C-alpha cells in the first residue's frame, strides 16, 4: 500500500491569506471577445469560470500564483499579474 498523496490532497493542505487588493486584474470585456478562453481550462485552481450570462468570471482568492493564466492569455485579458503583497497569498504546506 502506498503512502503517496494525490495532487488534490496535497493542494488541500495549502493555506491562503487573501488580500483585499487583487494581485491579478482581468478585463472581462476583453475576455468576452476571446474565442477560445484557455484560462477556463488552464488555471489549476479553477478560478476562472463561465458565468450564466456567458461572461468569464474570475476571483483571485485561492490563486496558486503560478502565472498560467497570464501565459495562456493571448488577447491581453489578464491586464495585470503579480505576486500578492507581503504576508498575503498562498502558503504551500507539505504534509
Image (cartoon, rainbow, N blue to C red):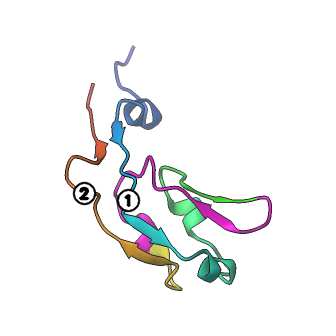
Residue 63 forms part of the magenta stretch: yes
Give the answer, above or below, for where 62 lies relative to 23: above
Foreground residue, 4 or 35?
Answer: 35
Give the side of residue 17 with respect to residue 12, left or right.
Answer: left
Given the current orientation, which residue lies at the most extreme top position? 1
**Quarter of the rendering containing residue 65:** bottom left
Badge 1 vs badge 2, beta-carbon distance below 8 Å: yes
Q: Which residues are magenta?
A: 52-71
The Cα atoms of the two marked residues, 1 and 2, are separated by 9 Å
**Position of residue 79 measured from the top left corner of the image (x, y, whole percent):** 44, 79
If the image is split into quadrants, where does the N terminus sit?
Answer: top left
If the image is split into quadrants, where does the C terminus sit?
Answer: top left
Residue 5 forms part of the magenta stretch: no
User: Callout 1: few (<14), some (14-19), or many (20+) C-alpha neighbours within 10 Å?
Assistant: few
Look at the magenta stretch and give its main secondary structure.
loop
Residue at image position (40%, 61%) is 22
User: Callout 2: few (<14), some (14-19), or many (20+) C-alpha neighbours within 10 Å?
Assistant: few
| Secondary structure beneath label 2 | loop
Q: Which residue is mark 1?
A: 21
Give the side of residue 38 with respect to residue 78, left or right.
Answer: right
Residue at image position (44%, 46%) is 62
Given the current orientation, which residue lies at the most extreme front position? 20
**Quarter of the rendering containing residue 80:** bottom left
Give the answer, above or below, for where 32 lies relative to 90: below
Foreground residue, 67 or 18?
Answer: 18
Q: Which residue is mark 2?
A: 85
**Quarter of the rendering containing residue 54:** bottom right
Give the side of residue 69 with respect to residue 51, left or right.
Answer: left
Of labels 1 and 2, earlier in sequence is 1
Amino acid at each position: 500500500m502506498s503512502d503517496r498523496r494525490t495532487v488534490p490532497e496535497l493542494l488541500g493542505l495549502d493555506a491562503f491569506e487573501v488580500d483585499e487588493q487583487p494581485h491579478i486584474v482581468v478585463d472581462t470585456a476583453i475576455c468576452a471577445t476571446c474565442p477560445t478562453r484557455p484560462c477556463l481550462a488552464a488555471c489549476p485552481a479553477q478560478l476562472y469560470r463561465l458565468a450564466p450570462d456567458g461572461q468569464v468570471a474570475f476571483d483571485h482568492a485561492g490563486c496558486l500564483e503560478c502565472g498560467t493564466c497570464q501565459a495562456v492569455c493571448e488577447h491581453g485579458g489578464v491586464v495585470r499579474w503579480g505576486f500578492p503583497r507581503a504576508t498575503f497569498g498562498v502558503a504551500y504546506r507539505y504534509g
